[in-house]
Amino acid sequence: MIDLAQLRREPDFVKAALARRGVSGSSMDEIISLDVDHRRLLQEAESLRAEVKEISRHVGEARKNKEVEQANELAAKSRELGDLERAMSEELEVVANELREKLLQIPNIPAPDVPEGRDENDNVETRRWWVGMDRDKPFPVFEDFQRVPHWQIGTELGILDLESGAKLAGSMFPLFRGAGARLLRSLGAFALNAHMADYEEIRPPSFALTETMMSTGHLPKSVDDMYAIERDDLWAIPTAEVPLTSMNRGEILDEKQLPLRMTAQTACFRREAGAAGRDTRGLLRVHEFDKVELFAYCTPDQADDAHADILARAESLLQALGLTYRALDLCTGDLGTSSARTVDLEVFSPGVDRWLEVSSVSWFRDYQARRANVRYRTAEGTTALVHTVNGSALAWARIWAALVETCRQVDGSVRLPDVLAPYMGDQLVITKKTS
RNA sequence: GGAGAGGUGGGUGAGUUCGGUUUAAACCACAUUCCUGCUAAGAAUGCGGCCUGCGAAAGUGGGCCCGAGGGUUCAAAUCCCUCCCUCUCCGCCA
């Protein structure tokens, strides 16, 4: 949620900033006028309430003094004012709800240096990396034996069984087996071990209450993309960002605790309702995948560093795995609702010949914290909203895909990078028989 | 799932019988100051959050918050309803 007080204070600035994301000035004006109405009604209702309280006190005194008549008279007066106040409060509620609903629909103010743009085609590529990269060439050379899609490799080696997954849960629920399952486990352990010195490792529940989903902005907006367990009023989390952001919901942290950094690997569930029929092959788009998330609550001053740290960690994992990737600075038109700035990392899949998003590192400013009500006490003793920053490091299904393609050898086997040796043991080279 | 007991400010903990000088006591912790004087004791004051009015500001007025949400009442921490959580016992169970 954006800061209503800021909109009140500097409406022109907020309007101009949001116009970059296509928010109309008139919708902002509606909010401003609702706010004026809301505060006027609030004042009126509150002063009535103050009178009722005052008179009620006198009723008590009068009755104690056995002044029955006086007491009844005052009670009647108070009742009258109370009725008036009740009516006023109902009107107030209507305005307050409308104001809140309108406010919830306003996206975050983009950071000043977010590139201008309409959609994902206007995102700005800021970096590209590959093993042995050469400044004179825009792209690495891939051999023919690497140009095999991962679903084919997976079937050949018996490490990916999409048919069984579909049999159990429907299409787009992958099933990994043998060395493929172990690879997935290895990737998660590898990443968590890399982060755990600076980020507390969390293993949160895989489901969340409606209230929790609201805090991050996933509800009500993306309701069709979530799996619901209606009977128990629970939602399957689409990312560990959901539980991590709400870990300290409603709390006031000590400034000394910040930045408070956490990491978690969870299963992530996505209905992908809006993308039905697209990217249905293999692991390009699946309903369930494992992902390691990095997260930080921090002060506004720490946000830049926190964001850079998460981005650097995601990139260093990609480099350690020897994958080809690029970084995209998301433009105003492609930025997520809650984000003020996002850098996406896309890995190149030689077998499918496409870039796949495997990480999204975002700075939310105080937008999520205002919704989740997470604050900190400053050195001066005042309270302020924290900033939240998060990013994936990394989303494993697509990494798994790009990795087996990139690491495929001429004989059809897959030789995994050495960094995974501690986790893969004697299965660092996956052949038909080892799986 | 069944029975019972609970949920009060940063912490401990009164108040709930029987609604009204509690507009939440007291203690601890914390902060500032004073006294004393040396790693102690004492005293005074302060001691939360959110929303909002007035004010340039310092400040000052009002409302809301006793697990959450409703209700009754002139008036609710206190009475009623629903839900959540914690603890004890029973049942079931990896």
Image (tube, coloured by chain):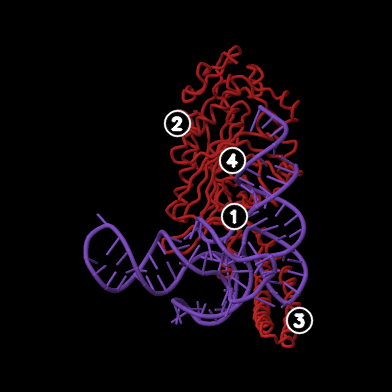
Q: Earlier in the sequence, mark 1 or mark 4?
A: 4
Q: Residues within 10 Å of mark 4 (few under 14, many from 20)?
A: some
Q: Quadrant for residue A134, please give it.
A: top left
Mark pair 3, 4: CA separation: 52 Å
**Mark 3, secondary structure of its residue:** helix
Q: Position of residue B41 (x, y in %)?
A: 32, 64
Q: Position of residue A102 (x, y in %)?
A: 69, 62
Query: Closer to the camera, A145 or A220?
Result: A220
Mark pair 1, 4: CA separation: 17 Å
Q: Which residue is mark 1?
A: A372
What chain does badge 2 belong to?
A: A
Q: Which residue is mark 4?
A: A204
Q: What type is the residue that disc 3 sits on?
A: Glu
Are the residues at dot 2 and dot 1 in contact (C-beta closer than 8 Å)?
no
Mark 1 on the same chain as mark 3:
yes
Q: Which mark is residue A80?
A: 3
Are the residues at dot 3 and dot 4 in contact (C-beta closer than 8 Å)?
no
Q: What type is the residue that disc 1 sits on?
A: Ala
**Which chain appears purple?**
B
Mark 1 or mark 3, which is nearer to you? 3
Mark pair 1, 3: CA separation: 39 Å
Q: Which mark is residue A134?
A: 2
For the view shown, which residue lies furthest in the top direction? A433
